[in-house]
Every structure is written in C-alpha cells, then in structure tokens.
Image (spheres, grey):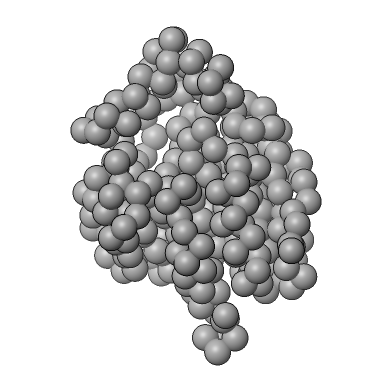
Amino acid sequence: MLQARPLVLHSQDGVRLAARHWDPGVRDVGAVVAHGFTMHSGRADLQRISRVLAGAGIGVVALDFHGHGASSGRVTAGADEIHDVAAAVAWLRNAGYERVAVLGWSMGGTAVVRYAGLGGDADAVVSVSAPGVWFERGTRPMRVLHWAFETRTGRATTRVLKRTRIAPDAWSTVPQAPAEVAGEIAPRPMLIVHGERDRYLPLAHAEHLSAAAPKAEVWLEADMGHAEVATTEDLARRLARWVLVSCGMPAAAVP
C-alpha cells in the first residue's frame, strides 16, 4: 500500500505549511489535493482520496491550509489560501512532474479555482462542492459557518472543537469570487463536480461556475452530499481518470 511522506512548504505570505507527498514512482502527472474547511491532509477522507489518485499513477501533494492541521497561520476562507496552492504546485514542478492539476473540495475548490483563474500555474482544475459566489446563507450549515467566521465566539469555538484557527480580519477587502475568475481558466481543462444532496451549497453554485466557465465539464452527482466525506472511491477513481486524460495521458494507458 502506498504511504505518504511528510513535507514542509512555505507560502508566499510566509506561512509554514504541513503537507504529504504520495509518490507513485513516476513523474508524468502531479496533483495538489486541497481540502475543505476544518479538514487537513491527515484526515481519513483526504488520505483515501490521495491514495486512489496515487494508485492511478498521479503524484499527490495533499496540504494543510493556513490555520489547519499542522500548518501555521490562520484561515482566510479561500483568500490567502491561493498562496498555499501555489507553494504545493511549485514543489511538484521542482520535483519533476511534467503536468500538474489542482483539485479542491469546498473551500479548497474555492482556492484552486481562484488560484488558476488569477493566473496560477495549473494544467487542469477540478472543483468539488465549491461555492461559485460568496455569502451563501440559505442553508443552516452555511449560517453556522458564517457565525464561525464572523463572531469572536464562533472563532473560539472552532479553535477548541475543530482545532482550526480563523483570522479575525480575514476579508478586509472582499476577494474575487470563484465565478468571477473561473472564465480565465480556459483553455485549460476544468471540471465542476457538485452533489445533488449537498446540505451546504445548493446546485446554484455549480450553475454559477459553469455559466462563468462554459467550456468546463460538469458532473452533477445524484447521491452525493458535500465535499470529501461524500467523495466515494468510485468518484475518486473517475476524478483520477479525468485528470490523467486532461493532462495528456493516452486513454488506453489510464486505469
């Protein structure tokens, strides 16, 4: 069974990042696996996804975002996390991976879309369960999330219960929403995945993204909930195949 080795990365804004490298032994395609809010690279769901990708021959760097897991810094809900994605992509490039895809779940999807849409170095982009626009308050889980970010009590509770550290002034200026920059990803391949049973973000968010990036491929998963927890091994294998084909691997060589 493939095992990951720990990495230490540093983002452009000086944050020390913990990460894990899953090495398949080839350097054709690498991928950044970017997690959602309160997750980190050591969680079982992230490791399961990373292991499936690596088993398909993709070199994976799964990182801990600002304020998550063993990384320093504080969470900024997809604003400064683009620097974390950049650090992971740079590591894969320096390690000799010829093509690099960026895959993100929920908040991580926000980060990879914004990273690539703002000119980041990615050959393919996968957004899973990500918001297209900001300030979704139409579902109870998202109202709780806003409470966590916007109140002192919420930030303290999240730090104690989830060991996730939130910046008190994360958005002094509101950053571009994913749908505002997604159109800049083309002609690079982009995949938008969203569960029809997502309790956090309605399907309208996938529609915002696809409207902004009309050349993107869209998978609406009938039985899927939200993000990593809802990503089955079957879906992870399909994501691996999409990444490999989108990064130029011949279809006959893709498991």
Work out whether residue 100 can be spotted.
Answer: no
Residue 21 x, y percent position in the rendering: 72, 54
From the viewer's side, name the closer residue of 193 and 132. 193
Q: Nearer the viewer, residue 45 or 133?
A: 45
Q: How many marks?
A: 0
For the N terminus, the quadrant is bottom right
Q: Quadrant of the C terminus?
A: bottom right
Quarter-wise, where is residue 11 in the image?
top right
**Horizontal side of residue 25 vs 40, given as left or right:** right
**Residue 122: x, y in percent?**
54, 60
* x, y percent for residue 133: 29, 41
The structure residue drawn at horizontal position 75% and vertical position 57%, both measured from the top left corner, is 3
| Identity of the residue drawn at 77% across and 70% down | 25
Q: Is residue 15 above or below residue 227?
A: above
Q: Position of residue 58 (x, y in %)?
A: 64, 68
Q: Is residue 253 above or below residue 187?
A: below
> Which residue is found at the position 48% from the left and 49% from the top?
228
Work out whether residue 10 can be spotted: yes
Residue at image position (54%, 38%) is: 39
Q: Find the residue positioned furthest to the top.
A: 152
